[in-house]
Amino acid sequence: MPWKYRLGDLSRVVSGKLNGDKDIEFTGVCIDTRTIQQGDIFFALPGTKVDGHQFVQEALKKGAVAVVVTKESVIPSVCVKDTLRAIQMFARWHRTNLKAQVFAITGSCGKTTTKELISSILSKKYKIVASKGNLNNELGCPLSLLQMDEDTDWGVIEMGAGKPGDIAELCTIAYPEESVITTIAPAHLERLGSLEGVAKEKSNIAKCLPPWGYFYVNMDNPYCVSIGKHIVANKIYYGGKGDIRLQSVRILSSDKMEVEIEPVGKLQLPLCSQSILSNFLLAIAVSLKHQIPLDEQMLTEAFYRAGRIKTYPLGPFTIIDDCYNANPASMKSALEYLEMVARPGFRCAVLGDMLELGSDSDKYHYLLGKQVGESGVDILFLYGNYSKEVEKGALETGIKSVMAFSHHEEIAEKIIKKFPPQSWILVKGSRGMTMEKVIQYLKEKIMKE
């Protein structure tokens, strides 16, 4: 049953000043007038480019029953000091009104894939609500919680950490009963300082659990293992050791592999890297804990729905499009995938910088170059300020052809001139490097030929 609250409830919960009838009812929350529904309440959020207060009148015309603002200007409204803080307070209160439980997910990479896999498992037995897209921050998490209603059994909530305190804050809003850290690896080091800083921040998703809660421990990551040793909640272990263990992997085709997993036996899953396979082990752990039968097709569909790595033909080439984002762990995963799927083809990597690695940026880009060489890449194209560091590591591991570029279009032109037909091309970099432009230019040039 959809939830329904009164304006007086909201003003009390967020400590705001009510302007209008306290008995006005609302049934949803909106922050964008383009998606507003009849019966919503509109939160006017400040933005870097546009202030939501500019759209208050439009929100009311489109069906909002009231607005939450920082300036007393219209009726009906609730006036608060901080509209973002208000939506967080409201989401926290809403969460406490529900019978639903929350499964919280964080990690340096693999969060979205894990969310899709766990959601698909739990949905076979329960009514679930999952974070949409990558809504995993101080706004996305509350918005996801507010999608849950009286009939929801589980919320599967993704949590990102860009600075110290983020995970702890999100956990005080979501109150999870089960949680996992997919992995701890170098990411957001500019703000979290070090790998130890990343581990300390992520650990809050385990520390916040109640004594009767469950923390899923990735036994292949020493930081996760250490965190598991220092919490009071129940633990379920998965990985190379533990309750759910990977026994063997056999590649069946360019898109499928057979894995043997203790205690469930053999499964056919999409071909993926070792790190992504860890996410499948977690999903299996969740299925066993909740006594939900495994479904290979369902897991496969969930993996492709996450859509982080897309493989498709483009002219004479096969593109591995992993442009969404990058850090050392996800780069390693992508290179593993290229090595697996492209056997015995001609393998190429087009890589942009990994951003937000702070003072260790040179080191991690040099190590990336060494990983490229060790993964059997035949030719390496680079884009970004750290190209020299990557090139140095790659040349030391035996790659004979490395080229750096200053424009995306130059990369596309050189691919067409230099790469042989049937090449497998991995394109990846941090979001700020906009590596998808390489693929777009490549499409345009191939279509003209």
Image: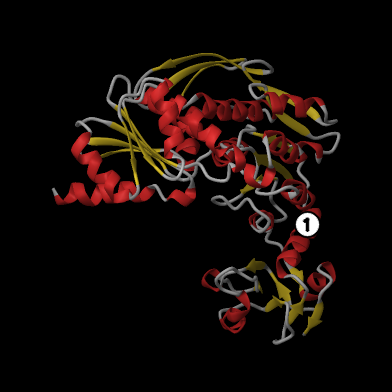
Q: Position of residue 408 (x, y in %)?
A: 33, 49
Residue 123 appears in the rendering: no
Which residue is located at x 65 percent, y 33 percent?
Answer: 184
Task: Point out residue 293 in the picture as x, y percentages from the top left corner.
Answer: 59, 27
- Find residue 246 and report its image quarter: top right
Relative to residue 34, is residue 157 drawn left or right? right
Q: How is the image coloured?
A: secondary structure
Callout 1 secondary element? helix
Number of numbered discs overlaid on the protein picture: 1
Q: Which residue is mark 1?
A: 92
For residue 350, above or below residue 242: below
Q: What residue appears at the point 70 percent right and 22 percent down from the top-left corner? A: 237
Q: Amino acid at mark 1?
A: Arg
Q: Is residue 207 left or right of residue 191?
A: right
Q: Nearer the viewer, residue 305 or 276?
A: 276
Residue 28: x %, y % from top left: 66, 67
* Image quadrant where one finds the N terminus: bottom right
Q: Is residue 57 above or below residue 273?
A: below
Q: Nearer the viewer, residue 91 or 168?
A: 168
Q: Is residue 225 visible?
A: yes
User: Local crowd at mark 1 within 10 Å, few (<14), some, or many (≥20)?
Assistant: many
Q: Is residue 190 above or below residue 267?
A: below
At x 69% / y 18%, what residue is drawn? 243
Extreme residue toward the top, this view? 247
Question: Percent x, y for residue 142?
Answer: 69, 57
Q: Is residue 81 above or below residue 413?
A: below
